[in-house]
Image (tube, helix red, strand yellow):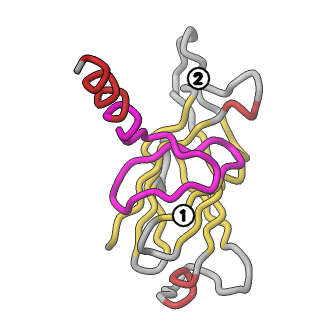
Amino acid sequence: MARRLCLAVCLLFLSCEDATAPAGAEVPLDSEFNLALGETVTVSGTGLSIRFAGVPEDSRCPPVWYCFWAGNARIELEVSGWLAVRDWRPGIKLGGGPVSLNTNTSIGPSAVRVGCYELRLISLAPESAPQVPGDYEATLRVVRD
């Protein structure tokens, strides 16, 4: 009996959802997920694929410093998928490959539109520019407009 209970508890822990999305994972719509630099996810039911392409700008103040301005980080996301073209709206360029979009931590925009969806940057870790650029991890959410 104790073995079955232990097995049930282990299976319960293994089935819990984690916000971290492994490379190539599928994430649900309207749910926060983490994406490390270079990783790609697919948003279920949307046809959208999102890749965290880079951080071309990071002027955020280190946590131990006292800064006049907190700074800003701009991240680049590559979005592809059939809905990005089918539900095209002004401001999104059409093309055969992925669309490159930028969003910011402090100064606008912190969200971008892709077709009938909005892609929101919730946060970017670490809180200041990391020593190793590959240490970035973005928390994102995709919602339907």
Q: Is residue 127 above or below residue 12?
A: above
Q: In the picture, which quadrant includes the N terminus?
A: top left
Which residues, given as a range, are shown in magenta? Answer: 12-39
Task: Give whichever of 110, 107 is nearer the camera.
Answer: 110
Q: Which mark is residue 42?
A: 1
Q: Is residue 15 left or right of residue 89?
A: left
Residue neighbourhood size for the residue with mark 2, other residues' Cα within 10 Å, grouped as few (<14), some (14–19), many (≥20): some
Please report the residue visible at 66 percent of the width from the left and 73 percent of the height from the top: 99
Q: CA distance from mark 1 to mark 2?
A: 32 Å
- Position in image of residue 128 (x %, y %): 60, 25
Give the mark nearest the N terminus, 1 or 2: 1
Q: Callout 1, which amino acid?
A: Thr
Is 31 placed left or right of 111 in the picture? left
Q: Amino acid at mark 2?
A: Cys
| Residue for point 54% across, 64% down | 42
- For the C terminus, the quadrant is bottom left
Q: Could you say which disc has been placed on residue 61 in the image?
A: 2
Residue 118 falls left or right of residue 4: right
Residue at x-position 39% and y-position 59%: 28
Residue farthest along the front direction in this orientation: 1
Above/below status of 31 relative to 116: above
